[in-house]
Image (spheres, grey):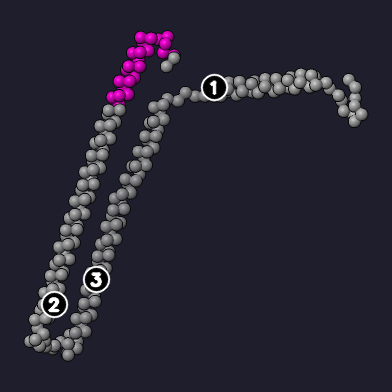
Amino acid sequence: MPVTGHGWLYIPYDTNLYISGKLNEGIRMSSESKKSKDSTTTSANATTINASQIVDAANENVTKLVNESSKVQPQYAQAISNLQQEYIDALRNAIQRTFSVQKQLVTSNSNFNNLVVPDAAAPYVQGLVKQSDELTNNFISVADINNQLTINALNVLRENVKNFSRTVEAATEYNSNLARSWASSYSSFQQQFPNDSRKF
């Protein structure tokens, strides 16, 4: 083959196609050989896993999480109850201390201790005391109604959770029966048409 003036080897066009075709074929055969070797290795290393084992493992792990969270719930409830009781005790103590100081201030001062209310102002003072008592009783009544409504709402939510649980049980039983029915039908179909079962 002649050499050009630039020192390059001249190869006819048809020869280029032939060489590139052979190179591509060699690369393709090498790639297919590697793929078949990889698939053989993968199939040799593959292990059979039952689908029910995966479902059982997932069920066990989720149940563990729920059980762990349920262990902590009583501690949370007790901690919240203790905190509420501390707030109530602190508020009660603050009120008693405040009025104790005011009472001491009033009793220690003779001007306040021997205070005489004029007859004209007496009805207003008595009305103020009565309104204060009524207002306090109204607050207590509203608080009782509010507490009862909250307790009723919590009881309704509890019943809803029970209904949800019963609904899940019914749906699970229905799906389980459906799965058993389908498996039974499929098994009988395989027994009737053993050669055609590979198509499905």
Q: Position of residue 83 (x, y in %)?
A: 29, 61
Q: Which residues are magenta?
A: 176-198
Q: Which residue is tagged 1? A: 43
Q: Dividing the picture into quarters, in which one does residue 84 lie?
A: bottom left
Q: Which mark is residue 191?
A: none
Q: Which mark is residue 93?
A: 3
Label 1 secondary element: helix
Q: Which residue is tagged 2? A: 128
The earlier-in-sequence mark between 1 and 3 is 1
Callout 3, which amino acid?
A: Asn
Q: Quadrant of the N terminus?
A: top right
Does the stretch in magenta take in 143? no
* Distance from Cα at disc 3 to Cα at disc 2: 26 Å
Badge 3 density bin: few <14, some 14–19, many ≥20, Cα 10 Å: few
Report the mark closest to the observer, 3 or 2: 2
The earlier-in-sequence mark between 1 and 2 is 1
Callout 1, which amino acid?
A: Ser
Q: Residue lying furthest bottom in this view?
A: 111
State the residue at coordinates (32%, 16%): 185
Q: Position of residue 88 (x, y in %)?
A: 24, 65
